[in-house]
Amino acid sequence: MTTNLGQIYNSVLFRSGIDLRGGWFTPNFFNDAIYSVNYEKMNQLIDVFEKNMEVTSDLQPFVKTLGSAQFPPLLFTAVNSNDSALGGYTDIPEDFWYEARANYTKFVNTGCGVSSSEYAPITLLKQHEFDAVMRDSNSSPVLDPDNNYPVMVIMNNLFYVYPYVRRASITYIKQPTAPVFDYDIISGVPVYLPPNEVHVNSSVLPAGTPSLSVEFEYPESCVDSLIDMIRTYMAKGNQQAWDLQTQGVPKNT
């Protein structure tokens, strides 16, 4: 995104008709808003993905594949090294947000003792689906773990695969990095401090301290919707604050 948080901040101020000195529109309030909107926007993109089963250009920057040229694959630990039927487990990636698809390298005997490899799918299941498959996997030739059609489920904050495979690739939608609006106070007005710059006049941090700012990860096409979502969040907050201030005080009896 080429539009930075300082520009977004000023755009929200302008569209809200609020003076730069703030009223209820403080930088801390803005930080609360962008933190909330960051995840709300991702959930909106996930909703579109679930409806159309298509990765839009807005969602594309968050698609990540472990087992690609950029990232190592998932490595599983066997529950019991002597019995692959008991499956394996691995940690869920810290930035995991939403599952998409997974596969592993399956070795196939082509005859005369010669084997080759091919990619085979690992089906990601919800807990109730996993329970059903485990009860009677033979009834489903598509989801048949005993014949090299592994299934995977999230249990106890781990990925669990059945039967055991040593390594797998997984493509998923990663969690968006939380944005942070850091600033200096210039002539009594908060001024955005971009990443890689240092504080000159901060009310909190000493001069020379590196900026703590973190930009949105969304593409430029999302700027307008992010601004509107932030403005709506802050308008609701302002209304709630106003309601609290104007509530009648009950008389003492």
Image (cartoon, rainbow, N blue to C red):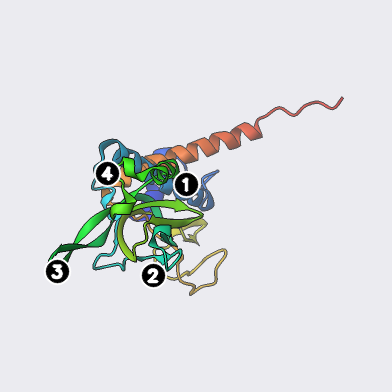
Res 160 seen here: yes
The residue identified by callout 3 is 114
Give the mark, 4 or 3, whose residue is nearer the N terminus. Answer: 3
In the rendered image, the residue lying farthest to the bottom is 208
The span from disc 4 to disc 1 (Cα, nearest Å) is: 43 Å
The circle on residue 36 is 1
Q: Residues within 10 Å of mark 3 (few under 14, many from 20)?
A: few
- Element on which disc 1 rests: helix
- Element on which disc 2 rests: loop
Using residue 91 as the reference point, say whether residue 73 is left or right of it. Answer: left
Give the mark, 4 or 2, whose residue is nearer the N terminus. Answer: 4
Give the mark, 3 or 2, whose residue is nearer the N terminus. Answer: 3
The mark closer to the camera, 1 or 2, is 1
Pinpoint residue 78: horizontal percent, then vertical percent: 42, 65
Give the mark, 1 or 3, whose residue is nearer the N terminus. Answer: 1
The span from disc 3 to disc 2 (Cα, nearest Å) is: 56 Å
Q: Residues within 10 Å of mark 1 (few under 14, many from 20)?
A: some
The residue identified by callout 4 is 141
Residue at the spot x=34%, y=62% of the render? 165
The residue identified by callout 2 is 196
Residue at the spot x=47%, y=40% of the render? 233
The mark closer to the camera, 4 or 1, is 4
Q: Residues within 10 Å of mark 2 (few under 14, many from 20)?
A: few
The span from disc 1 to disc 3 (Cα, nearest Å) is: 56 Å
The span from disc 1 to disc 2 (Cα, nearest Å) is: 24 Å
Quadrant of the image containing the C terminus: top right
Residue at the spot x=54%, y=72% of the render? 206
Badge 3 amino acid:
Val
